[in-house]
Image (cartoon, rainbow, N blue to C red):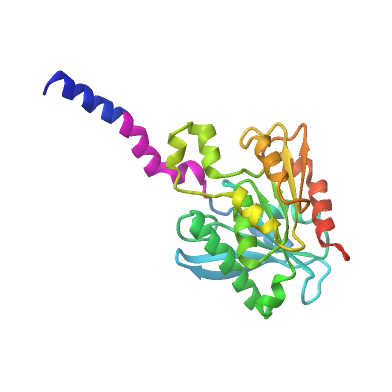
Amino acid sequence: MSLRKQLLRLAAITILTPVLFLLGCQSRLIYHPAGYRAEHETLLRRAKGVRIPFTTAQGAQTAFYIPPRTGGDLPQTIWLCFGGNAALALDWLHFTDLWEDDFAYLLVDYPGYGECAGKPDPDSIRDSGKAAFTALAAHLQQPEPDLRGRLAVLGHSLGCAAALMTAEDLNVRRGVLISPFTSMTDMGRIVLGWPLCLLNRHRFDNRRTLQSIATRQGARFHLFHGREDEVIPVAMGRELGAMGSGAVSFREFPEAQHNDILVLHQDEIGRAMHSLTAPGT
């Protein structure tokens, strides 16, 4: 083999190796599924929660319904909750006791997480959000159109994308988003640079989805972001917070990082949830 061909071959290998790696390993870079531990089952029992089984193209899935602490047959507000890429649905139970007694929650895992079969990607996560709501409506013995008016969404990090997709599909017009990113391709640009970010196959686009939802009559979303966020730059939250012609508000916390914002500012999150659901709002 000539020297020229050897150099061309070496150049091709050098270029293709990271490309093939990124194409083959993207899911492992983005998603970090885990299973449940005994402590989660304890939290579920304490909250009087029930499993909501359903099926998607990924196979058997499980979400969790947490009824309001005030009791009653049908809650006025049901929060559809979506966690970050290394979180589990029942992790929200560390916070729900601190929020309104009359809130109910549908805690949704992604395919491959918790007790759910399959693999996560934008399409399968979108399917899970819709199917979990359908299963909840059946559990509560309520027509889906009647129940949709009681819904709000809550998301953190990757969960902001899941929350917005579900809100778009179910016509939910209120929600709280914590540590949101603009798009997964923008995140890829930060981590990998250009042009490798263009190889992204998991095209979550919160910019487009939020802009679409914000045009709906009565839409109201509160966005929170930590200025010291070491994972998703606060500039992304600021950009999203500037959308919506008044339908979207944004607040940043100077000392908060990506995950500890949930703990440090759980009270502010609860107040924002209350402001979206109080009578007359």
Residues in magenta? 15-33
- Left or right side of 193 for 73: right
Q: Is residue 226 above or below residue 148?
A: above
Question: Residue 195, position in %: x, y?
Answer: 44, 34
Quarter of the picture containing the C terminus is bottom right
Residue drawn at (52%, 33%), measured in percent from left and top? Answer: 191
Question: Residue 240, position in %: x, y?
Answer: 68, 45
Residue placed farthest to the left in the image?
1
Find residue 162 and report its image quarter: bottom right
Q: Is residue 111 visible?
A: no
Quarter of the picture containing the N terminus is top left
Magenta-drawn stretch, dominant element (helix, strand or loop) = helix
Question: Residue 70, position in %: x, y?
Answer: 84, 68
Residue drawn at (75%, 43%), measured in percent from left and top? Answer: 263
Find residue 100 and report its image quarter: bottom right
Residue drawn at (73%, 56%), measured in percent from left and top? Answer: 175
Question: Residue 261, position in %: x, y?
Answer: 73, 40
**Is residue 25 located in the magenta-colored stretch of the structure?**
yes
